């Protein structure tokens, strides 16, 4: 094998290690416009997403949405398919043998009744829940009640770069009533969820989804105000191949605590993970994983009409830390009065009530450890509405948009796109896609001043029908963080859900074939 081949394989291997599930093919020098001795930026050609089971409520109404932005240089062919995790579960071997024997029983050229049922079953298993037809146009599907499934999906070719999926659920009444939304995520081996709870007023599930053909083994660690909680069955949880497993957090420990940090560690295999936090009085929402532990965190897009903001933070290890707290407002970075610094004890979950932090203006929290020396994870729980008619949502520490990110299931009214550039100014481009049922894409460019958060007036497709996608691209400056809020009012209750926009990791730098990549082959 010559050095050129080794170089390309090493580049693809490094990518797979970073993303967990992604692939690129050997670049076409002419299509990529690459220069000798320089890295070419190419679209990822294969990726995967996992969506947790939306709800256990019979009153739930769920919309699944899938979208891939148009990407220059992407392959001309490909697919993007989401299927039910249960439909993709590997059948029992003995069951297969019995079905094969009965299915082969034929008389007068006709299959048996059992064979007919098997054919219908196979057709159902193979049928996608959602499949894209073309880049730049989102598609959606609806499901009602508690039977809406967890989804497992893959995209390749022209659909892989920037592929995004979202599920949005409205629950009319009962525990967790309100609007619940979560972006489908890639499989990984470790997750942090500050802001969960084992209190009697909460019903919190950690949803684990396994996309692979072999079982995954997972440990769930819980940390409260005094350190790690004693768990009874949190170790060695098996998630069957191509299946989803919801785990009720209160069944893992006898301790009832309002604020808990959940740490998911995968011993073997990989999973997707998200916490569904449901409250008896203040509705509920999904709590996505926090960005990796870091000495600097940004929690973007706290709604300007937030009635209460509760920060939950945790630092792994034994070191204590005093977090510097600042709010990136429309006018710049400010220090909240009375909350200039927050003290965290090593290995213990801490919670802080920040009140009506935003006071009618767009805002994002910026948390900084001295010299960035102590890593932290964090999330906020936000309440909107008046007492007795409040709804809750969660915003974890987010990763920056390095190149591009997309939010789905937007509507002409009730959508707020919040963008912050806490360190330096930035220019961004925002594209509104065509609608799921029609409309013409629109694009606008915005300048974000240093240290500010702006709720921008995002573009809306001309002649919009259905929902649409908003794609944010960083043109210059940064780093840039963003979140999207969906809101509506039902029975006087302000339903809402907030999703941070992580970079879609749709592009990757592939070194030129003439480069020596021996360093990547260690």
Image (cartoon, rainbow, N blue to C red):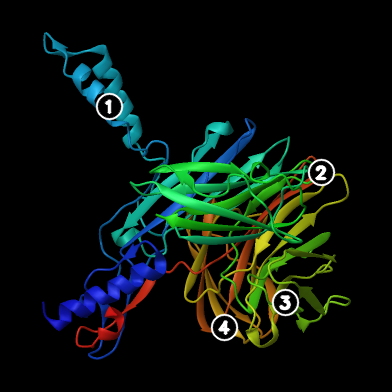
Q: Quadrant of the C terminus?
A: bottom left
Displayed quadrant of residue 83: top left
Residue at disc 2, secondary structure: loop
In this view, 432 is above or below 199: below
The x and y percentages for residue 496 are 70, 52
Displayed quadrant of residue 13: bottom left
Residue at 11% x, 8% y is 108
CA distance for labels 4 and 3: 30 Å
Q: Which residue is mark 1?
A: 94
Binning the other alpha carbons within 10 Å of mark 2 as few (below 14), some (14 to 19) or many (20 upward) gives: few
Q: Give the mark, 2 or 4, whose residue is nearer the N terminus.
A: 4
Q: Quadrant of the N terminus?
A: bottom left
Binning the other alpha carbons within 10 Å of mark 4 as few (below 14), some (14 to 19) or many (20 upward) gives: many
What mark, if any, has residue 320 been given in the picture?
A: 3
Q: Which residue is mark 2?
A: 492
Q: Give the mark, 3 or 1, whose residue is nearer the N terminus.
A: 1
Q: Give the mark, 4 or 3, whose residue is nearer the N terminus.
A: 3
CA distance for labels 3 and 1: 55 Å
- Residue mark closest to the camera, 1 vs 4: 1
Q: Which residue is mark 4?
A: 478
């Amino acid at each position: 094998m010559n050095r050129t081949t080794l170089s390309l394989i090493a580049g693809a291997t490094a990518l797979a290690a970073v993303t967990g599930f992604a692939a690129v093919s050997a670049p076409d020098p002419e299509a990529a416009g690459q220069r000798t001795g320089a890295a070419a930026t190419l679209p990822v050609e294969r990726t995967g997403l996992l969506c947790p089971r939306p709800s256990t409520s019979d009153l739930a109404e769920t919309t699944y949405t899938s979208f891939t932005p148009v990407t220059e240089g992407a392959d001309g062919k490909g697919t993007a398919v989401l299927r039910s995790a249960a439909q993709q579960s590997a059948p029992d071997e003995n069951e297969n043998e019995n079905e094969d024997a009965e299915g082969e029983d034929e008389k007068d050229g006709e299959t048996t009744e059992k064979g007919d049922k098997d054919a219908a079953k196979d057709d159902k298993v193979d049928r996608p829940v959602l499949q894209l037809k073309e880049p730049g146009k989102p598609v959606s599907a609806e499901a009602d009640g508690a039977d809406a499934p967890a989804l497992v999906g893959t995209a390749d070719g022209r659909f892989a770069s920037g592929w995004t999926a979202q599920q949005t659920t409205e629950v009319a009444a009962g525990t967790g009533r309100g609007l619940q939304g979560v972006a489908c995520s890639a499989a990984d081996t470790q997750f942090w969820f500050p802001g969960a709870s084992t209190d009697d007023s909460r019903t919190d599930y950690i949803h684990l989804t396994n996309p692979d053909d072999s079982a995954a083994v997972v440990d769930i660690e819980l940390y409260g105000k005094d350190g790690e909680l004693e768990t009874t069955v949190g170790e060695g949880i098996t998630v069957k191949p191509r299946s989803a497993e919801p785990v009720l957090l209160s069944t893992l420990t006898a301790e009832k605590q309002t604020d808990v940090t959940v740490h998911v560690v995968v011993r073997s295999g990989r999973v997707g993970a998200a916490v569904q936090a449901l409250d008896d009085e203040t509705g509920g929402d999904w709590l996505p994983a926090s960005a990796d532990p870091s000495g600097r965190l940004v929690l973007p897009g706290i709604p300007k009409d937030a009635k209460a903001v509760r920060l939950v933070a945790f630092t792994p290890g034994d070191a204590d830390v005093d977090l510097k707290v600042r709010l990136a407002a429309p006018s710049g970075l400010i220090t909240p009065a009375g909350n200039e610094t927050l003290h965290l004890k090593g290995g213990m979950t801490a919670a802080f009530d920040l009140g009506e932090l935003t006071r009618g203006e767009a805002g994002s929290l910026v948390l900084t450890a001295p010299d960035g020396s102590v890593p932290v994870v964090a999330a906020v729980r936000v309440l909107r509405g008046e007492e007795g008619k409040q709804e809750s949502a969660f915003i974890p520490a987010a990763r920056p948009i390095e190149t591009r990110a997309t939010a789905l299931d937007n509507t002409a009214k009730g959508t707020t796109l919040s963008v912050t550039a806490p360190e330096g100014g930035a220019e961004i481009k925002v594209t509104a896609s065509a609608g799921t049922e029609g409309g013409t894409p629109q694009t606008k460019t915005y300048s974000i001043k240093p240290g500010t958060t702006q709720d921008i007036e995002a573009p809306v497709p001309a002649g919009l029908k259905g929902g649409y996608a908003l794609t944010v691209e960083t043109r210059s400056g940064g780093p840039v963080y963003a979140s999207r809020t969906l809101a509506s009012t039902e029975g006087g209750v302000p339903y809402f859900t907030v999703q941070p926009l992580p970079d879609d990791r749709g592009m990757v730098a592939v070194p030129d074939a003439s480069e020596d990549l021996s360093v990547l082959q260690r």
